């Protein structure tokens, strides 16, 4: 089943959180159902496709790629038929996905630049979600997009201090310094954001000193995403 179901905990949070934030801004519409199904299938399709490009093992990844590709095509057709204006967003996705394919082919998919590009791609989903809602606020949508990118970039750096760069003092200082900056920016924007960003800073300082399994790190990140996501979703109401 690992050929069909992605095992990246952080990616699931990035898949869902921008969707919830977009709906919190614009209101819920029935159009969000096919939009999310299309987004989910697109992610499921990209998972075996990138592994296929990385490993060259067509016998292992051809079937899930074709399966999800076959499911994705009619969903894309529905979305384009309902909202043809979203074709511009498809062009943006392709622009961001090309570097992901390059890094996968070069077996450098864990590079920090690739992480940042993937994060920007995931978080950009807030725009079509907000667009297909009942009321569009571009300013607030863009603010939440920036905050989502900043949050997930901090998570990417922090996770490296827990796993691949566990004993690297440079990444530890980078992670802590980054979260200090995010704390200041968040407090300047909205005092409510001091709650999750303070917790994220303490996490970046304390947890790298502990011996935690990869699965435990992933579960903690899901919990952190829930806390941050709750605040982000409530921001339109608070403001």
Image: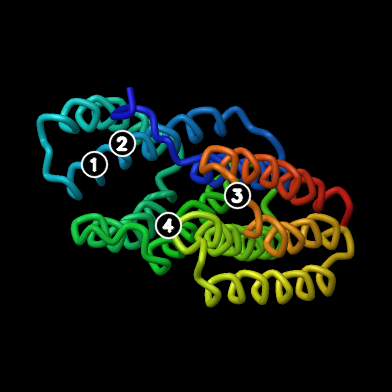
Position of the N terminus, as image quadrant, is: top left
Q: Nearer the viewer, mark 3 or mark 2?
A: 3
User: Is there a contact, CB below 8 Å, between mark 3 and mark 2?
Assistant: no
Q: Residues within 10 Å of mark 1 (few under 14, many from 20)?
A: many
Q: Is residue 238 left or right of residue 177?
A: right
Q: Residues within 10 Å of mark 4 (few under 14, many from 20)?
A: many
Give the numbered dot on residue 211.
3
Q: Mark 4 vs mark 2: which is more N-terminal?
A: 2
Q: Nearer the viewer, mark 3 or mark 1?
A: 3
Q: CA distance from mark 4 to mark 1?
A: 15 Å
According to the picture, the residue beneath numbered tag 4 turns out to be 118
For the residue pair 114 and 138, the one nearer the viewer reads as 114
Q: Mark 4 vs mark 1: which is more N-terminal?
A: 1
Q: Is residue 56 above or below residue 63?
A: below
Tell me residue 78's x, y (percent).
38, 31
Residue drawn at x 67%, y 63% is 147
Give the numbered dot on residue 98.
none
Q: Mark 4 vs mark 3: which is more N-terminal?
A: 4
Tell me residue 184's x, y (percent).
79, 75
According to the picture, the residue beneath numbered tag 2 turns out to be 45
Tell me residue 92's x, y (percent).
38, 60
User: Is there a contact, CB below 8 Å, between mark 2 and mark 1?
Assistant: yes
Tell me residue 107's x, y (percent).
23, 58
Q: Nearer the viewer, mark 4 or mark 3?
A: 3
For the residue pair 180 and 163, the one nearer the viewer reads as 163
Q: Mark 3 vs mark 2: which is more N-terminal?
A: 2
User: Is there a contact, CB below 8 Å, between mark 3 and mark 1?
Assistant: no
Q: Is residue 238 left or right of residue 118?
A: right
Give the numbered dot on residue 49.
1
Q: CA distance from mark 4 to mark 3?
A: 28 Å
User: Is there a contact, CB below 8 Å, between mark 4 and mark 2?
Assistant: no
For the residue pair 181 and 93, the one nearer the viewer reads as 181
């Amino acid at each position: 089943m690992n050929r069909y179901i992605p095992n990246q905990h952080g990616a699931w949070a990035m898949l869902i959180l921008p969707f919830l934030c977009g709906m919190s801004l614009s209101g819920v519409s029935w159009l969000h159902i096919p939009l999310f199904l299309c987004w989910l299938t697109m992610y499921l399709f990209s998972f075996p496709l990138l592994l296929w490009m990385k490993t060259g093992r067509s016998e292992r990844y051809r079937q899930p790629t074709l399966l999800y590709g076959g499911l994705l095509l009619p969903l894309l057709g529905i979305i384009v038929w309902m909202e043809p204006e979203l074709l511009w967003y498809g062009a943006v996705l392709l622009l961001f996905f090309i570097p992901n394919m390059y890094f996968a082919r070069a077996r450098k998919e864990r590079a920090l630049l690739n992480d940042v590009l993937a994060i920007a791609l995931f978080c950009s989903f807030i725009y079509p979600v907000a667009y297909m809602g009942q009321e569009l606020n571009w300013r607030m949508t863009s603010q939440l997009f920036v905050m989502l990118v900043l949050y997930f970039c901090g998570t990417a750096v922090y996770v490296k201090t827990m796993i691949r760069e566990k004993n690297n003092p440079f990444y530890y200082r980078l992670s802590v310094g980054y979260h200090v900056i995010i704390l200041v920016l968040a407090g300047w924007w909205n005092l409510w954001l001091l709650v999750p960003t303070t917790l994220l800073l303490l996490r970046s300082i304390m947890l790298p000193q502990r011996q935690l399994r990869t699965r435990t790190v992933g579960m903690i990140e899901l919990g952190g995403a829930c806390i941050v996501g709750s605040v982000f979703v409530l921001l339109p109401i608070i403001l």
